Image (spheres, helix red, strand yellow):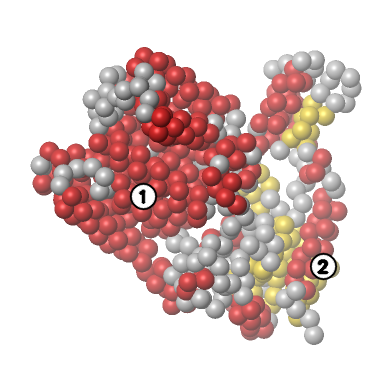
Amino acid sequence: MQSYFSPLLDVFHYLLMARLPAPLAGFALGALHGLVFLPVAGIAWLALRGQPRRARLAPLLAVAGLCTSAFLSEFGGSMADNTTALFVTAALYMVLLAQRRQADGARRAELLAWTVAGAVLGVAVALKLTNAIYAVALGVAAVCAGGAWWRRLAGAGVLTLAALVVAAALAGGWYLRVWQAFGNPLFPQFNALFQGPLAAPISVADVRWLPRGAWEHLTWPLQFAVDPLRVSEIRLLQLVWPLLYLATLALLLRCFARGTVAPPAFAPAMRGVLVFFGIGYVLWQGLFSIHRYLVVLELLAPLVLWFLCQRLLPGGRAAQVGGWAIGVVAVASLLGWNTWGHERWARQGFSVEAPPMPAPERSVVLLVGGDPQAWRVPWLPGQARYVGVATNFPESAAYRARLAAMVEAREQRFAMLPAAQRQDGARWARLNRWAQVFGLTAGRGCDRLRWLAGKARGLRAEVEVPDPGQCRLGPRRRASQEPVDASVQARSQARQQLAGYGLLLDEGSCVTLDSRIGQGRYPYQWCRVGLAR
């Protein structure tokens, strides 16, 4: 489904990985992500204007923002949320700066700041369309501070115009082509509105993460803090959301009760941050509720939590409680650091063994099932046609008809499906040698080894006990079945899936080919496909 979205950022990642040694490309991505410290620190600097210890607090709060679960999970990776967060936070910083220039009466500097903010925001939306929720939030925040109301509205107009121009220049051509081809510029999202014939009439394609019922909507930060898998495929430990939720409730109750704690005076920029944060969160929960889309808000969460502590508690106690709360959140995220998977470095980031395809221009390749397989396509013959079947795409009857016509039109038909990964004995021997060096293979060291195996997702390991008091790392039981049996099971499932399209999988023709990400092996099966008569 993601292949229908603007490929700008994917092209950047592809060129980075294809032209540079993989370790250098990974370093470049990590360095790019680290640059987000600058706008986040700048936002804190403007929002804390007039506060004591601002020079120390602003960088510390920015560092705490980088030590949050969603950002850490994608650090140095290619999932786009960290990369585009750099542009969204830069746009917010420029909006706050424009509001300050507006209040000071610096017309030329104000206009420049609004224009730059809009341009940077346009880049963010062009690179990743889900950033549109932050564009809406920023548009509202733009009128929350500054000079007279008409000047605020004029500034928001400049922001909007600049964002639209830049987004259209960068991604407008792509979305126009998608609209012409599929009848929906955002295909397949929001197809209930555009009624593109090739997809089901849905609003948002992936609704499995959304809260259900009024109670979950009202308590969602608590719900996904207790069960992170409600908003993510991987477990991301994040304590800042329940703390923000409870602190906000306490502040509302105190306001209703008219408590006696005098709130400290904050700069108008803090009002803009709070409006942006609040509207951004509400839109996220209502439209997506996918944790990794929260990177921008989690970068700002320590600043917002600090503000709430200052409003709830008196002077010195507020600083102490706020510091401890933010420190605990950062430490918890670091100790529970989870990722989307890492492999050991190789000079070449990706490699794919070429399949037998004697006439690519007369071939169609079916990517069967929900496992990620499209990453192999850039290394396969470009003359062939590639299409996903039995994936997460919301197919319509017209989609199936188009698929049938495509398959009929090409003489050679192939299916690509997952193959079982063979266990790497040398890898386990190497890991266990290191475990022995650090005293993790006997006695109490086994408890630490179990903790490590549970936390380090990239290990894909569990602890085995060959003898009493001794332990070692080994493959997870679910992954340790015989590769041949697992590959047969994958073919059996693919046969059933293809049968639903009137296609036959020729299991006797299947061969297993190699493909790699770094040093990690991800073999795939290549099979011929026939028509069911």
- Residue 214's spot in the image, x, y percent? 57, 50
Q: Which disc number belongs to residue 137?
A: 1
Q: Quadrant of the C terminus?
A: bottom right
User: Is 365 above or below relative to 408?
Assistant: above
Q: Quadrant of the N terminus?
A: bottom right
Question: At 39% across and 50% down in the image, what residue appears?
Answer: 134
Q: Of residues 49 and 23, which is closer to you in this image?
A: 49
Give the residue number, with chain letter if any, for mark 2.
Answer: 507
- Residue 189's spot in the image, x, y percent? 51, 65
Q: Quadrant of residue 359?
A: bottom right
Real-space Cα separation, disc 2 to disc 1, in angstroms: 53 Å
Judged left or right of residue 462, residue 343 is: left
Of the residues shown, which amino acid type is indicated by label 2? Glu
| Element at label 2 | strand
Of the residues shown, which amino acid type is indicated by label 1? Ala
Q: Few, some or many C-alpha atoms within 10 Å of disc 1 (few <14, some 14-19, many ≥20)?
A: many
Does any portion of residue 256 appear in the rendered image? yes
| Element at label 1 | helix
